[in-house]
Amino acid sequence: MNKLAFSLLIFVFPIAAADEPLPSVDAIYNHFISATGGKAAWEARHSQVQHATIEFPKQGIKGAITIYEAAPDKYLAVTELAAIGKIAAGSNGAVAWENMALTGPRIKKGVEKAEALRDGVFNSPLYWKKLYPKGETAGSEAVEGHDCYKVVLTPREGEGKPITEFFDKKSGLMVKTTTTAASPFGEISAEIVYDDYRKDGDLLSPFRVVTRAAEQEYVVQVQSVEVNPDLPQDTFNLPAEVTALLNKTAETKPTASPENRAATSAGADSGKLAIYMAGHPVASETYTVKTSDDGVEIDGSGSATLGTIKVNIERFDVRTNSKYEPLEAIAKAKMGQIPMSVDATFSGGQAKNQVDTGQGPQTKMIPVHPDAVVVNANLPLYPWTLLAMRASFETREPQQVPVYVLGQAEVPGSVVFKGREPLQFSGKSIELNHLTVSGATPQGQPISLDLWVDDHRKLIKIAVPSQGVEAYQEGFEPKGEPARPQ
C-alpha cells in the first residue's frame, strides 16, 4: 500500500503510553492480515491495478495516478499532473527507475534502489520478516485519533533507515507510517496516513492516503481497483529511455569477459566442497571443470541436510562456448521426495526452460544476455567457478556481469577484485585472490558473495555472509574444530 505514498516523494517523536503487555510484531501483523481479509485472500491476489486521483491542496495541483502491480516484485506507477506532466516510476524486480517529463530518465541506486525494490514487493505484509531482519513493538501511542501499537522495522545495513508503523489496537488496521526516505535531493522525512478503508474484492484497503513530506502534502484518493487483471506481458518492461541509460552506464564500466580475464589452461580439473551453515556442516558437492578451445563444461552433484529436509542434487551441469556464453544448463534435484528439474537451452537472447516440479514439464521463455553466468538460486555453489574464470585481476573497478538464476530470471551482478590476501586454514596458510560479487535475487533481495580463488581460478573458499554460509575446497578445511551437525 506504500506505493500510493512513495511514488512522489521526489517532490517532497512519540511518547510511550503507560506500561502494558505489548504483543509481538508477528501478532500485530497477523491481526492486520486477518482484519483486512485473511492470509488466503492476500495469497489469492497475484496482481492488481489501482486508479486514483492525486491532489496537492496548497498548490492547487490535481492529477491522476495509476499503479500496476504483479507478484512477486514488479510495479509501475504512472502519474499525470497539470503543469508538471507525466511521471513514471517502477521496477522489474531488479532495476528501479524513474522517468519525468521535466528531468528525463533516472536509474535508482544505492539506498534509494534498495527502498524501491523493497516497496515493490507484492503483498509485502505477508513477507515483512524477509524485508526487515529486525522488528520490534516499541510501545503504544495515540495517532490520528486512534489508540495504536507502534512497530519499528529495521532493514538490512546499508539499505535505508528504520520505518515506524502504527496499528489500531482494536481494528488491527494500519493507521500511519513514518519514515526517512532517500531521494536525489537527500533524505526526506515523511509520514503517510491511511484512511477510508474499503473492500476491493476480498481485501480491505485504504482508499485515502495522505502523505506529508518536505513541508508539502498530497492526497491520493483511490477510485477503483482491478483485481488479478490480465496485464500485458510488457507492462513492467523497462522503458526504452531507461534501457538506453542502463546500456550507456554499462558501457562505461569494465565487464567480466574473456577479453579481460587471465588465461585458463585447457584440460580437466575436479573439486569437492564442504559447506557449513552457522559453523555446522550441512552439505557437500563434487564437480568437474573441463576446458577446451570449444568452451567450458562444468558438471557435478551434491547433497544437503537442512534440519529434517534432505536435498539431493543429482546433477547441475553448464556448458558454454569459448566466449563463456551459455549453451545449455541442466539441473536435477530432489527436496525430500519432491523432484525438481530444469533443462535450459540458450539462443537469440532467450533461455528456453523445461521446468518440472513433479506436476509435469512446463516451458518458460526468459530473456537472458548471451554472456550471462548461470547459477542456482541456492545450492550448488560450484557453478560460481564460471564467474571466477571470467573476472579480471587487472582492475579494482566493478566489473558488470549478468547472472541467470536457472529457471527464474536474469539479474544484474557486479564483481570486484579486492586483491591478494593470506587466509588461514587448518594446518596451513595460503595467499589467494579475493573477489566480491554483489547483486540481487530475482525477488529483489540484495545478496553478496565472497570468493577466494587460487591462481588457476579454482574456488578455495566461498562465503555468503547474509546466510551464514561458508564453503571450503577439499584440503583447505576451516581452521579449528568444526561444529557438530545440529
Image (cartoon, grey):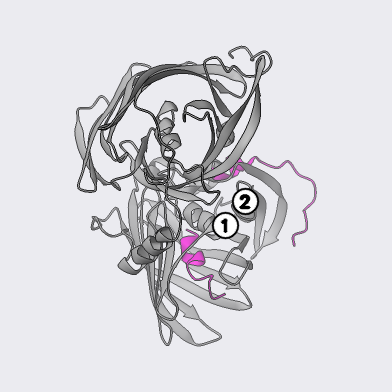
Q: Which residues are magenta?
A: 1-29
In the image, which disc is placed on residue 158? 2
| Disc 2 residue type (three-letter) | Gly
Q: In which image quadrant can residue 95 be found?
A: bottom left
Spatial CA distance of label 1 from label 2 is: 7 Å
Relative to 47, residue 486 above or below: above
| Image x and y of residue 292, in percent | 29, 28
Q: Residue placed at 34% from the left, 63% from the top?
A: 243
Check the image and report above or below for 166 versus 280: below
Query: Left of 437 or right of it: where is 269?
Result: left
Residue 315's x, y, as percent?
32, 20
Q: Quadrant of residue 373?
A: top left
Q: Which badge, 1 or 2, comes first in the chain's sequence?
A: 1
Q: Name the disc covering residue 111, or none.
A: 1
Q: In the picture, which quadrant includes the C terminus?
A: top right
Q: Position of residue 139 (x, y in %)?
A: 72, 49
Q: Are marks 1 and 2 in contact (CB under 8 Å)?
A: yes
Q: Is residue 312 visible?
A: no
Three-letter code, disc 1? Val
Residue 86 is a magenta residue: no
Residue 482, position as x, y percentages in the image: 64, 14
